[in-house]
Amino acid sequence: MQAQPLIAVSNVEASSRWYQKTLGLKSGHGGNDYEQLLHDGRMVLQLHRWDAHHHPHIGNPEQRPYGNGALLWFWTDDFDDAVDRAAAAGATVLEGPKENSNAQHRELWLRDPEGYVVVLAGPYGDVGM
């Protein structure tokens, strides 16, 4: 099994550009209504326009904050490069980069343009206990 999170957004193309620039992902589909974002050829995130295709369970764009209680968590081997990409993209930093001694890795907490919380985490054992 592999998780393939889907988030609802108001502007698929703008969100896609943000994730590509900030996380280094690649477009695997493209379009105004739906996008698949890839890392090393594997889909890691889907973007779906709120009002496209009449999905009754996608959520309500009037209820904020989006994703309250759910985080988009990305593990990466190249944590330092990911931090540099996020800075170059002008991403909104909520916290970090910081060391999480419980998980023994580093983390960077961001907010995407739609308001979702995105966490970049280095590999386990990246920092000592």
Image (cartoon, rainbow, N blue to C red):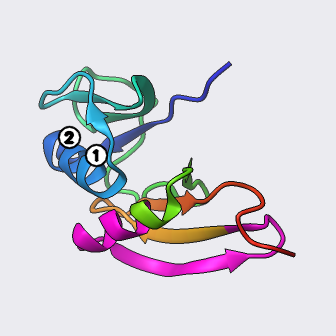
Please tell me whether residue 127 is drawn above or below residue 39 in the rendered image.
below
Residue 33 in the magenta stretch? The answer is no
Image quadrant in which you'd find residue 99: bottom right
Q: Which residues are magenta?
A: 82-105
- Labels 2 and 1 touching (C-beta < 8 A): yes
Please tell me whether residue 97 is drawn above or below residue 19 in the rendered image.
below
Which residue is rendered at x = 39% and y = 68% of the image? Answer: 111
The residue under label 1 is 9
Q: Position of residue 82 (x, y in %)?
A: 42, 61
Figure disc tally: 2
| Mark 1 surroundings: few (<14), some (14-19) or many (≥20) residues within 10 A | many
Image quarter hosting the N terminus:
top right
The residue under label 2 is 12
Residue 87 in the magenta stretch? The answer is yes
Q: Is residue 64 visible?
A: no
- Camera-nearest residue between 58 and 94: 94
Using residue 23 as the reference point, say whether residue 27 is left or right of it.
left
Please tell me whether residue 8 is drawn above or below residue 79 in the rendered image.
above
